[in-house]
Image (spheres, rainbow, N blue to C red):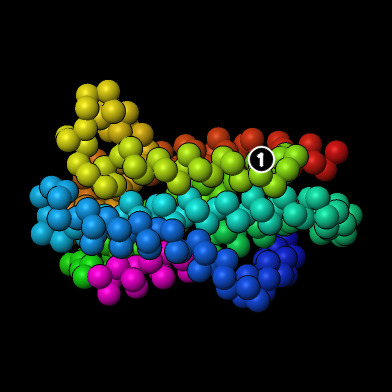
């Protein structure tokens, strides 16, 4: 399985490398949001930090990943509609390799997007006192978050009837950080909005990443964040594999 998955992964990565505009397109929206909030709204937003880009970056990274997984849906949708998926599953390879190649491609391409966003943030003044272990923990959380959203993305990629329908699910994911602690502290929100913001996954994930990047001490947020990521991933994986089996007939 590993060798076949590697071959299929290489095929998808070559397609991305031939058109790097995919990664650039995914990175542009979160970068523009970061520029807008730091240089236009940042001076009027009270977060208790001296450098707003430091406060903002974790949420921007989650937005970048949410944008990126939509391309997993598109790649899967195109493979299904073009008949390429049907051709692959008739070959002497483990059928799950076809699915895992798309999932791993999402992981790699989103990692590249995250690196691009962080580089831009550094140019804007982002600084962190995190050590290598803290950064590895941040990478682990972002990786789990990517996998969780990718397995969600697989479902419409296999079941959607149109390209528009395949990508429609991604818009709520992209805008979910706006109703969280990503841009402003939840304490400043109206009571009902605050209740939602403090109990949705983005807030705990953002808070965990901030803790690792700037405080260095791991609190409860990291365990809540990991629980959200693992829970979403397991549920999405279950429904994605069922959709894949139906696709196989």
Q: Residue at point 22% right, 27% down? A: 190
In reply to whether residue 121 is colored magenta, the answer given is yes
Viewer-side residue, 14 vs 41: 41
Q: Residue at point 34% right, 68% down? A: 118
| x, y percent for residue 242 | 71, 36
In this picture, residue 42 sits left or right of residue 4: left
In this picture, residue 228 sits left or right of residue 169: left
The kind of secondary structure element at disc 1 is helix
| Image: 226 above or below 50 | above
Badge 1: residue crowd in 10 Å (few <14, some 14–19, many ≥20): few
In reply to whether residue 7 is colored magenta, the answer given is no
Q: Residue at point 85% right, 54% down? A: 83
Viewer-side residue, 154 vs 134: 154
In this picture, residue 228 sits left or right of residue 79: left
Q: Is residue 3 visible?
A: no
| Image: 85 above or below 230 | below
Q: Main secondary structure of the magenta part?
A: helix
The residue labelled by disc 1 is 165
- Image quadrant where one finds the C terminus: top right
Q: Residue at point 50% right, 53% down? A: 67
| x, y percent for residue 212 | 24, 56
- Image quadrant where one finds the N terminus: bottom right
Q: Which residues are magenta?
A: 110-124
């Amino acid at each position: 399985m590993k060798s076949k998955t590697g071959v299929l992964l290489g095929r998808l990565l070559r397609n991305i490398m031939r058109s790097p505009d995919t990664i650039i397109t995914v990175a542009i929206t979160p970068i523009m949001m970061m520029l807008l909030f730091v240089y236009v709204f940042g001076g009027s937003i009270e977060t208790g930090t001296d450098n707003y880009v430091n406060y903002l970056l974790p949420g921007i990274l989650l937005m970048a990943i949410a944008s990126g997984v939509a391309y997993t849906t598109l790649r899967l949708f195109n493979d299904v509609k073009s008949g390429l998926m049907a051709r692959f599953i008739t070959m002497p390879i483990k059928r799950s390799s076809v699915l895992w190649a798309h999932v791993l491609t999402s992981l790699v391409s989103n990692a590249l997007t995250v690196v691009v966003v962080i580089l831009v943030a550094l140019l804007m003044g982002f600084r962190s006192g995190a050590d290598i272990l803290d950064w590895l923990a941040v990478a682990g959380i972002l990786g789990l978050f990517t996998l969780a959203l990718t397995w969600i993305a697989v479902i419409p990629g296999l079941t959607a009837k149109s390209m528009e329908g395949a990508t429609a699910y991604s818009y709520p994911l992209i805008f979910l950080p706006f109703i969280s602690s990503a841009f402003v502290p939840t304490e400043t929100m109206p009571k009902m909005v605050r209740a939602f913001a403090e109990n949705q996954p983005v807030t705990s994930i953002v808070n965990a990443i901030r803790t690792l990047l700037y405080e260095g001490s791991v609190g409860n947020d990291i365990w809540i964040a990991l629980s959200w990521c693992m829970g979403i991933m397991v549920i999405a994986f279950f429904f994605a594999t069922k959709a894949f089996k139906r696709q196989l007939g």
